[in-house]
Amino acid sequence: MSEPYAIVIAGGGPVGAALALGLRDSSHRVALLESRAVDTVTDDTRVIALSHGSRLILERLGVWQALRDVTPIQTITVSQQRRFGRVELTAAEARVPALGYVASYAALQRTLMSAVTGGGVDVLSGCTAREFNSTADHATVTVDDDGVTRHLLTSLLALADGGESLRLAPMEERDYRQSALVCDVISEAPHENRAFERFTPQGPLALLPTPRGWSLVWTARQARANALAMLDDAQFNAELQAAFGNLLGALRVSGARQLFPLKLKHARRPGAPRVVLIGNAAQSLHPVAGQGFNLGLRDAWELARAVRDAHDPGDPLRINTYFGERRFDRTATILFTDTLIRLFSNDIPLLDRLSSAGISALAAIPPAKNLLVRRMMFGAHG
Ligand SMILES: Cc1cc2nc3c(=O)[nH]c(=O)nc-3n(C[C@H](O)[C@H](O)[C@H](O)COP(=O)(O)OP(=O)(O)OC[C@H]3O[C@@H](n4cnc5c(N)ncnc54)[C@H](O)[C@@H]3O)c2cc1C
């Protein structure tokens, strides 16, 4: 016997949970499946730089106030190792209260999930979607619920599993052959709500302000990232200081270092009737400009708006229209992120000179700088 739902969301990460929240007061029967048990404490140490646009969505979803330990970013400094070019973007220039906000992935996930469990959605935690099928009329999902197999029948299946477990159509994929090393860092100088992005030939290095000091996201080729992860603290501190410089005084790692291998993946087509991909299941990006979750949140928000009041939420025509409407934001954000990596993190001499000129030019041309700030804050619609 299949259990009937109007909408099933497979994956209760921050994007799937945001979609569930956007649908909680609709008339639809909605299920949110999440593999992890509800009280699991994630060991994910990454932080997420939220754009101003994401803050507005989280406010409308009613969770912004509940999000703890959020650090506003007032200034972003973009520079290049061994180059003079540097550009500084400020919230005052952009006429916004902050250029962005830093929250931990764990806090974001916890806050969204606890709001969803408040009612309006069937939250099936500790439940893994194993496989799905779809026709023009409906989709079915086979679920492993703590060892018990269940079958769900739905008008619309939203895949929000992060892209790691359920496969729809072949994805366009490019391995950056880089990993992001993430850890907490303490500096001699206080952060004063600044964020830094420093491009090196190996990959970008970002320092984001947090209540504890900084979160470091240091991207490098895989062998180098693995080697950095293995160093003892003193050796690691010396490498970090050499790569970042002395702007913040002595830098010191604090706590565990975590590695994330980086690939660009994205779906060119919807793939199957009544199935829609959102968040990292639809596209996973390089974290260089902190766009992945911000883009995924827009996927979730726009999907909730498209299906909330629909009689048949998974109507293939509606889903194709949604996919088409999301195309511009997705393509522009992927292109923006990928171009930053190709242009600024390379050791090809011509590109290297061009990118250095590019950073100096950005500093000198207010409209270009403004465009960069807006793109970083709002995505392609900025
Ligand atoms: C180092 C790093 C730094 C980043 N920094 C930023 C940043 O500053 N700003 C930004 O916007 N983005 C950033 N990102 C990207 C961001 O982390 C992702 O875009 C975001 O986590 C995607 O959320 P999601 O919910 O789509 O997927 P995920 O976060 O991967 O969540 C997927 C969820 O689905 C569950 N799941 C998986 N399979 C199943 C299944 N079969 N059945 C049921 N449940 C399942 C998982 O348990 C998980 O909870 C960064 C990424 C990295 C790696």
Image: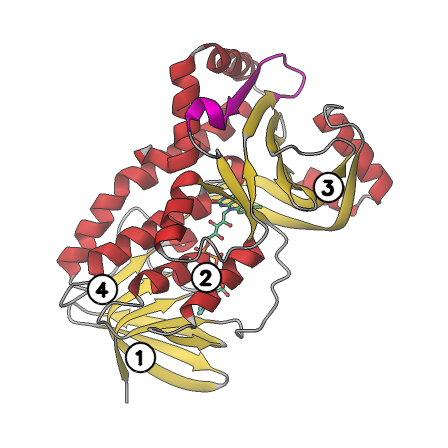
Determine whether the beta carbon of the residue marked 3 sits less than 8 angstroms from the nearest atom of ligand 1.
no
Q: Are marks 2 and 4 in contact (CB under 8 Å)?
A: no
User: Which residue does the numbered mark 2 point to in the structure image?
Assistant: 112
Q: Choose top left, top right, bottom left or bottom right for residue 180.
A: top right
The mark lying in front, picked from 3 and 4, is 3
Percent position of residue 271, x then y? 27, 56
Of residues 105 and 27, the one drawn nearer to the viewer in this rendering: 27
Q: Amino acid at mark 2?
A: Leu
User: Which residue does the numbered mark 4 point to in the structure image?
Assistant: 274
User: Which residue does the numbered mark 3 point to in the structure image?
Assistant: 185
Of residues 103 and 360, the one drawn nearer to the viewer in this rendering: 103
Q: Which residues are magenta?
A: 80-95
In this orientation, does residue 377 appear?
yes
Q: Amino acid at mark 3?
A: Val
User: Which class describes the residues within 10 Å of circle 4: few (<14), some (14-19), or many (20+)?
Assistant: many
User: Which residue does the numbered mark 1 point to in the structure image?
Assistant: 152
Type of colouring: secondary structure
Q: Are marks 1 and 3 in contact (CB under 8 Å)?
A: no
Q: Amino acid at mark 4?
A: Arg
Could you tell me how far apart the alpha carbons at marks 1 and 2 are, in whole angstroms? 24 Å
Could you tell me how far apart the alpha carbons at marks 2 and 4 are, in whole angstroms? 25 Å
Q: Are marks 1 and 2 in contact (CB under 8 Å)?
A: no
Could you tell me how far apart the alpha carbons at marks 2 and 3 are, in whole angstroms? 27 Å
Asked if residue 84 is positioned above or below residue 278 in the image, the reply reads above
